[in-house]
C-alpha cells in the first residue's frame, strides 16, 4: 500500500460524470454490446469475473476491480488441470489495454502483482484507517460483494449518475448464476453446479426487474438488500441518480429501472464525442512528497511493531512457564497476574492483535467467568497465552518481511 496509490486520490474527480458498474449476472448478454457506446463518455468499472465477457465483445473497461482478500493463485478454477483463478482471469490477453486494476489493502500481496498499467488499492469492509500511520480512506458501502465496492468507488469518485449492468442477483430462467465466460469455477457437471448453488443458500422467488417473479437465493438476496439500503441513504443525502439497467434479475427499490439503451439515449448521448474519462485520470499525479512522508511513517510503524512483538513474545513465554508448573506459590500467582496484565496491555497497542485474537479473547472471558478455581483460571489463561504466542509469531514474521520490502523500495 506504500508502493501503490490509493483510489481516494480520485475522489470527486469525476463529478458530473456517469459511472457504470458491470457485473457478471446472466442478463449481461442482453445488453453488453451497448457498452461500446459508453467508452470515454462514462466511467466503466468492471468486476473481475465479468472482464472476459466484456473483452469478448471488444470492450475494455476503465477500471477492473477485485477486492476479495484471497490469493487468486491459491483458488482453483479447474482442479483437474490445476488451473487457478489467477491463471484463468489474470493474463495479458484478458488485461490488454486495461489501465487500472483495483484491489483491497487487506488482500493478498499477490493480488497487487497484476499486468496492467497501474494497480490501485482501496480499503473496503474492514475499517482499519485509524490504526495505520498514514491517511487511509475506509469505504463503508460494502455489502459483501465486489460490486458493492465498485458502487462505493463510483459514489466517492463523485459520479452524478450510476448505472448497474449485469447485476441480476438472481438465477436465469435456465438456472444459471452467472453470464457465459464469467463462472467462478469450471462447473460443467451437474454435481459441481449443485455444490456451487448450495453454497449460495436456499432458493426462493422475489419481485423481478420487469415486475414478474424471479428465483434468487439467500446470498443474492442479502446483497440486494444492501443495495436498497445504500440507495435509500444516497437518495436522501446526495444528488446522485441511481439506475438499474440490468434488464433482468431482481427489482431494486431506490433505483430507476430502464433498459441500458434508454439510459444511454436519455442520460449519456448528449455528452458529445470527446473522451471525458482518460484526461481525468491523467490529471491526477502522485504526490512524491507525501509518498516520502508515508514511507518514513510506515518504516517507523513497522519497526515499532517488531519491537512490540518481541516484548509480547517475552512476556507470553514467562506467563506460560508459570502456568505450566505443577504447583504455583502465592508469589507465582502474583507474578503470573502481573505478567498477564502486561501482556494484554501490550496487545492493545496494535488493533491487529484484537482482530487476530477475537475468538481466543472471547473464550478467555467466558472461561474465567465460568470457572473460579485457580486450576481452571490458569488453564484458560494458559490456552490464551499459547494462542498469543502462535499469532505473535505470524505478526512478527509479517512485519519483518514488510521491513525488508519497504527498505528495498526507493
Image (spheres, grey):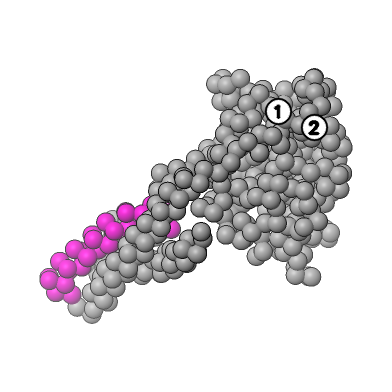
- Labels 2 & 1 near each other (Cβ < 8 A): yes
Residue that protrudes farthest toward the left in the picture? 330
Where is residue 142? Give x, y as percent.
57, 40
Locate residue 335: give its quadrant: bottom left
Where is residue 364? Give x, y as percent.
33, 59
Q: Which residue is mark 2?
A: 38
Q: Which residue is mark 1?
A: 18
What residue is at 23 percent from the left and 61 percent from the top? 342
In front here: 362 or 85? 85
Q: Crowding near pointer 1: few (<14 within 10 Å), some, many (20+)?
A: many
* Magenta segment: 328-357
What residue is at 72 percent from the left and 23 percent from the top? 256
Q: Main secondary structure of the magenta part?
A: helix
How far is disc 2 from disc 1 in space, using C-alphas? 9 Å
Mark number, residue 409 = none
| 340 sits to left or right of 303 | left
What residue is at 77 percent from the left and 38 percent from the top? 166
What residue is at 70 percent from the left and 28 percent from the top? 18
In front here: 224 or 367? 224
Dot 2 or dot 1, earlier in sequence: 1
Q: Secondary structure at mark 1?
A: strand
Locate residue 83: give its quadrant: bottom right
Tell me if I can see residue 313 in this picture.
yes
Tell me if I can see residue 361 in this picture.
no
Locate residue 339: give its quadrant: bottom left
**Is residue 347 part of the magenta span, yes or no?**
yes
Q: Indicate whether 161 appears above or below 322.
A: above
| 32 sits to left or right of 66 | right
**Is residue 123 part of the magenta span, yes or no?**
no
Q: Crowding near pointer 2: few (<14 within 10 Å), some, many (20+)?
A: some
Amino acid at each position: 500500500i506504500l508502493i501503490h496509490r490509493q483510489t481516494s486520490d480520485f475522489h470527486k474527480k469525476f463529478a458530473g460524470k456517469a459511472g457504470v458498474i458491470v457485473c457478471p449476472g446472466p442478463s449481461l448478454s442482453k445488453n453488453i454490446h451497448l457498452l461500446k457506446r459508453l467508452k470515454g463518455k462514462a466511467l466503466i468499472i468492471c468486476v473481475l469475473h465479468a472482464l472476459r465477457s466484456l473483452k469478448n465483445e471488444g470492450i475494455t473497461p476503465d477500471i477492473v476491480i477485485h477486492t476479495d482478500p484471497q490469493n487468486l493463485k491459491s483458488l482453483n478454477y479447474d482442479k483437474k488441470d490445476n488451473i487457478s483463478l489467477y491463471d484463468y482471469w489474470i493474463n495479458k490477453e484478458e488485461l490488454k489495454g486495461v489501465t487500472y486494476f483495483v484491489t483491497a489493502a487487506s488482500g493478498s500481496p499477490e493480488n497487487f502483482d497484476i499486468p496492467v498499467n497501474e494497480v490501485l488499492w482501496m480499503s473496503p469492509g474492514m475499517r482499519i484507517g485509524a490504526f495505520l500511520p498514514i491517511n487511509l480512506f475506509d469505504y463503508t458501502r460494502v455489502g459483501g460483494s465486489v460490486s458493492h465496492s465498485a458502487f462505493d468507488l463510483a459514489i466517492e469518485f463523485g459520479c452524478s449518475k450510476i448505472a448497474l449492468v449485469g447485476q441480476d442477483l438472481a438465477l436465469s430462467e435456465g438456472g444459471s448464476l452467472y453470464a457465459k465466460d464469467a463462472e467462478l469455477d469450471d462447473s460443467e457437471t451437474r454435481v459441481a453446479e449443485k455444490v456451487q448453488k448450495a453454497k449460495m443458500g436456499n432458493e426462493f422467488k422475489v419481485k423481478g426487474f420487469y415486475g414478474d417473479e424471479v428465483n434468487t437465493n439467500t446470498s443474492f438476496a442479502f446483497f440486494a438488500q444492501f443495495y436498497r439500503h445504500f440507495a435509500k441513504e444516497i437518495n436522501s443525502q446526495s444528488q446522485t441518480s441511481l439506475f438499474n439497467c440490468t434488464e433482468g434479475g431482481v427489482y431494486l427499490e431506490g433505483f430507476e429501472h430502464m433498459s441500458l439503451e434508454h439510459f444511454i439515449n436519455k442520460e449519456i448521448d448528449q455528452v458529445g464525442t470527446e473522451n471525458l474519462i482518460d484526461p481525468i485520470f491523467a490529471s491526477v499525479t502522485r504526490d512524491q512528497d507525501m509518498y516520502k512522508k508515508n514511507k518514513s511513517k510506515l518504516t517507523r510503524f513497522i519497526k515499532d511493531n517488531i519491537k512490540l512483538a518481541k516484548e509480547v513474545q517475552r512476556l507470553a513465554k514467562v506467563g506460560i512457564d508459570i502456568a505450566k508448573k505443577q504447583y504455583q506459590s502465592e508469589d507465582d500467582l502474583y507474578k503470573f497476574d502481573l505478567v498477564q496484565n502486561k501482556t494484554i496491555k501490550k496487545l492493545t497497542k496494535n488493533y491487529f492483535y484484537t482482530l487476530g485474537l477475537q475468538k481466543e479473547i472471547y473464550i478467555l472471558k467466558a472461561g474465567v467467568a465460568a470457572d473460579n478455581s485457580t486450576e481452571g483460571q490458569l488453564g484458560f489463561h494458559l490456552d490464551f497465552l499459547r494462542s498469543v504466542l502462535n499469532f505473535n509469531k505470524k505478526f512478527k514474521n509479517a512485519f519483518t518481511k514488510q521491513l525488508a520490502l519497504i527498505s528495498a523500495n526507493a
